[in-house]
Image (spheres, rainbow, N blue to C red):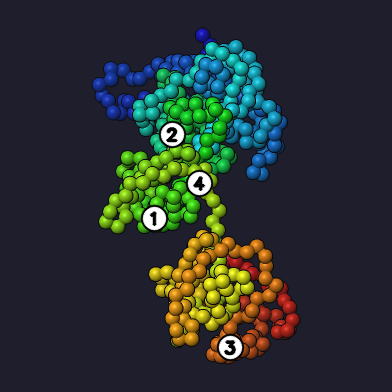
Amino acid sequence: MSRVHFRQAQPDLQHYFFTMLFLLASVSTSLAAPFPVEQGEAVIKRAVIRASSCIVKIETIGGLDLLDGQLTNTGPTTGVIVSNDGYIITSSFNFAANPSSILVTLPESKKRLPAIVVARDHLKNLTLLKVEAQNLTPAKPVDLKQIRVGQWSIALGRTYVSPLPNVSLGLISALERIDGKALQTDAKVSPANYGGPLVDIHGDVMGILVPLSPTGKGLTEGVNWYDSGIGFAIPLQDVLVSLDRLKTGKDLKAGLMGVSFGTTPPFLAEPVLQEIRPNSPAAEAGLKTKDRIISFEGKSVKTVANVKQQLGRKYAGETVSLVVKRGEKTEKLSVTLTDKLEPFRQGWLGILGQRIPSIDSPGAIIRHVFPGSPAEKAGLKKQDRIIGLDELKITSYDQLRDHIFLKQPGEELELTVVREDKTQKIKITTEATPGTLVDQLPLPILTQKKKKEAEKEAEKELKAKTGELVKTLAEHQQKYRLYVPEDYQHDAAYGLAFWLS
């Protein structure tokens, strides 16, 4: 029988066996004899030998030399057989450089066969390959419900000439990581075994090793963590559920609802919807701001993190059921997820407002109406004062502008307008912002008081002090230093330099 080549993982293997021996001796006094290291090595060897028949070596030819400013991986990588007729699953990272050719070496016959890309799973960073071969040995999956934190895990890869895979031993350190879709292990995981299996001590496959990151979605995210003790694997049981869809040649993409929550950390915040993206699945399903999600696919959710764990496993095109609390009532809704949200388009009225609010006359005072705009069509005029938008009270132009930006083109609004001391209601329909630029815009209107204040400020600037000055930001009570040249002249142009410390 061939020997397993542990290579660089050998010191870690010994470390884990001695750790296991110490723990067993500590928690149980009923053992008649210490747990023999040789017995543990035999268990690992049997697991590796059993799993090796489903592990293939993958080589690529051509492609980009640099990716995200870094040299691309040009060495061999790993894949796992998932059906006896030549389908192989692997990490999409292995093809991030877009190679021109892919070659697969089978485990038993050592045949080197060309492979084609059938489809990609963008949600889980996996790629399905196909080679022309029959009677292959597919991986045997571990039931996801049987995987526990703290159990042994073995990361395997086939990149050397050795007849058996290279080995790294570790533990399952967490479940449902990366929005609920990955196992976490402290076994050393590197580009050499991305796409390879994470197996249990029986040689059955728990998951497919992929680089992932909780903060990014790209193919190279998480690669910088390799050999760090933080590695991820997509459960093989989940991969097999979506295998038939990948075999059709259609890429699978992450499902999007089109909602956002608050800025509180997800594991602390209640799942209350802050914004609903216009024309999104959430909007079409009838979700509203301030709705609190209390159930997702029949499972109770108490935090934003709970929602992300459920949503993070879903694909575009799938329909999910939600129960939300709206006021004192509960609503049952179905949302069909999408792979792409439409770009947000801001509504446009076609007015410019007076920038300096009037204390005596609150509201948004119109200083200019664009020709041909929705405002002109609705009959708005200069000096009209808008004091209401639908049911909302308007106290300034900035407030009106911010609310109009949240409206979509084509929405009908009702404005409350004061004109010559008379109040009237005017209906107006927003339009998309025009793509052409106006040659010249009117200058803002200044009140006499503000005009005098501006003149005084300008006069002060003409008499600016020179040398090193110490000033204070009024709104932050923070001091800064300013140096003005001794030969400063107010009517000359100067460069400005900042020093930040």
Point out the tag, 4 or 2, that comes first from the N-terminus: 2
- Label disc, if present, on residue 384 of the rendered structure: none
Residue 163 visible in the displayed image? no
Q: Residue at x 59, y 77 (%)?
A: 368
Task: Tell me how far mark 3 sits from mark 2, CA to CA.
Answer: 66 Å
Location of residue 267 in the rendering, given as x and y in whole percent from the top left corner: 38, 49
Disc 1 versus disc 2: nearer the observer = 1
Q: Nearer the viewer, residue 138 or 422?
A: 422
Tell me if residue 105 comes above or below residue 388 in the rendering. Answer: above
Q: Which mark is residue 183?
A: 2
- Of labels 4 and 3, earlier in sequence is 4
Q: Residue furthest left?
A: 30
Q: Earlier in the sequence, mark 1 or mark 2?
A: 2
Q: Earlier in the sequence, mark 4 or mark 1?
A: 4
Residue type at the position of mark 2: Leu
Give SS at disc 3. helix
323 in relation to 356, above or below: above
Q: Amino acid at mark 1?
A: Lys
